[in-house]
Image (cartoon, helix red, strand yellow):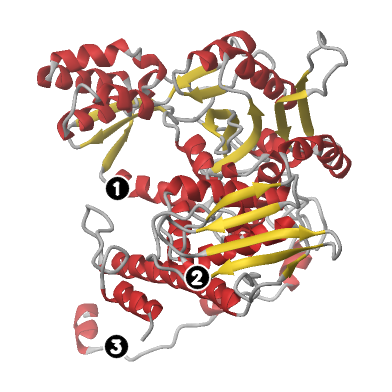
Amino acid sequence: MDDEDEQQNEVLIGGSDGYDSVVDEEPLTARERVRTCTAKLLQITNQLQIANQLQREAAEGKLGCEADRGVGQRFSSRDAFRDAVSKYAILQGRNLTYDISNTKVNQRLGVKCVEGCAFYLYGAWESRRATFVVKNMQLEHTCHKNMKRNRQLKSKWVAKQILKVSKNRPHWPAKEIVETIKRAFKVVVQRGFAYKVKYASHKMLHGSMHDHYAKVGGYIAALKASSPGSCVELVTVTKLNKQPAPPPVFQRLFTCFEGLKKGWVDGCRKVICVDGCFLKTFLGGKLLSAVGRDGNEQMYPIAWAVAEGKNNLSWEWFFEQLKNNLGLGDGEGVCIISDEHMAILNGVTNVLPKAEHRHYARHIYALWHKTYKGDELKLMFWKIAKSYNMADYKENLETLEKLDPDATNAFTAYNPRLFCRAFLDTTVKSDVITSNMAVTFNGYIINTRTKHLIYMLEEIRASLIQRLVLKRMEMHKCSSFLCPNIQKRLEKEKNKAAYCDVMPSSETLFNVSYQLDSLVGLADPGKNRIKDPYENPSKPGHLTRTGMEITCNNCQLKGHNKRRCGNPTSFASEPLTKKQATAAQPQPQHPPTEAEAQSHQ
């Protein structure tokens, strides 16, 4: 059994990467444990496969490790010789260094191992043969293999070896890269080295950032050609004080597709959650997003923008773009939901002064919870925030004051009118006070944010297209009149309504009692149906015979009935009815009884 098999057995039996590792502090169900162990086993299997592949390539000579073939070996160039030395040092686990490096005299290179080791390698350029030749070599080592330090293990060299893997796995975690290098090359590296490897492989695959951002103009032109109604607005900065003038520098990019804009205007409530998140590249920047709620109470991305940061200028520019594309006007009838970032507050005030601006209750609770902890206080916070009327709001606030007066003062200091349901404007017809939609979108694109501009925007576009198609297919399969989530919510409300007693007070006023609580409210009186002028009010739904022309059953003439008929002959010739015939028949004669005979006497 070789070392690699022993390592595999160690991993599968136990250890830091096996089944004995702690996955989470909270208790997990059996199904979650199975899923976690399966995921770890697949991760270990992938690492072993990659490491074995690299070792097979080294054994087959695909890595070009030919430095041990003897004196006189030729190389096409000095760099090819250096590359062969690097691969030899890495695969053999030797910390080799260059003690001679002279580019002026025959491009000489001398290689040695650690101090006290007999290994030596010397090569130079031969002008007569136009090739780089190994002149002298001593390949026997008197030192031990080194797994912690190898100066020839460069990030660019490793990036070349794992380039195919990096192309298939652009989000390859640094922890797995460290483990793969350890298994394949027997060298222990730090996580920082793994990030350098990821950067080098990314640069090999996608080129430099100057070339990348030079393609932004073409990308915008392609989007506008395929969707003329979409808005893609680019903002650049040019330094005019320099001569010659440098190329423009990217600053912001706003994107709002025509389909998303039309869907929000026609089919969504006028609620917009805005938020910003970090871009996880070495260039930095922020992604500003505006997310609505669709008919199924799920996220509906409206627009997003890449900006230099979350400042007053960027947010005000973002709200201006939203206002122009969605036709928001001065914000009347629109609700903006955000955190308490001052740049967002200033942007909404300047661009949409008449919009209702709500604050994330979850964000306020996070600040309030830093000082006032405990499950009981947490429960009271959300009871107050989710109270639908002033009576419940005041009652819950008084309960909180009895528990902790300081917590009550801190709660009211955050201006409850901005995050409590009891103070919301009913024009928008939405009781949203949390940041669920914006946070959901940020989590939805968390892996996408690790890519550079064009790749990130294209992946967001493709993922949203796929999401909209799936949602449309789900709604086609839905058999209920309402959306699935709304139907579930309605069924819950029906179960609660079964415990309510409703007593009408007038046509539009009703008294609703639930246990010890009573509520008097107005109901929609509706409109009565327009009745037919000949409809009988005592028999709704049945028409009277008013206006109909009658026919006489005696003379068969129109305009009168049988009672008022003046033609008796027709009446006499008419056959008798069954009742009349029975009455006209003579009664049969019976002999008198003894009682009748005595009564006559």
Rendered image: mark on residue 51: 2
Residue lying at 56% horizontally and 61% vertically, measured from the top left: 479
* Residue located beneath label 1 in the image: 498
Q: Could you say which disc has been placed on residue 266 in the image?
A: none
Residue mark closest to the camera, 2 vs 3: 2
Q: Which amino acid does label 1 sit on?
A: Ala
* Kind of residue at badge 2: Ala
Residue situated furthest bottom in the rendering:
591
Report the residue marked by disc 3.
592
Between 309 and 360, the one lying in front of the other is: 309
* Residue 183 position (above or below residue 389): below
Count neighbours of disc 2 (C-alpha within 10 A) and say few if under 14, some if 14 to 19, many if 20 or more.
many
Residue 578 location, x and y as percent?
Answer: 58, 78
User: Taking 137 as reference, is 48 left or right?
Assistant: left
Position of 543 relative to 124 (above/below)? above
Residue 507 placed where, x, y %? Answer: 43, 29
Q: How crowded is mark 1: few (under 14 residues within 10 Å), some or many (20 or more)?
A: few
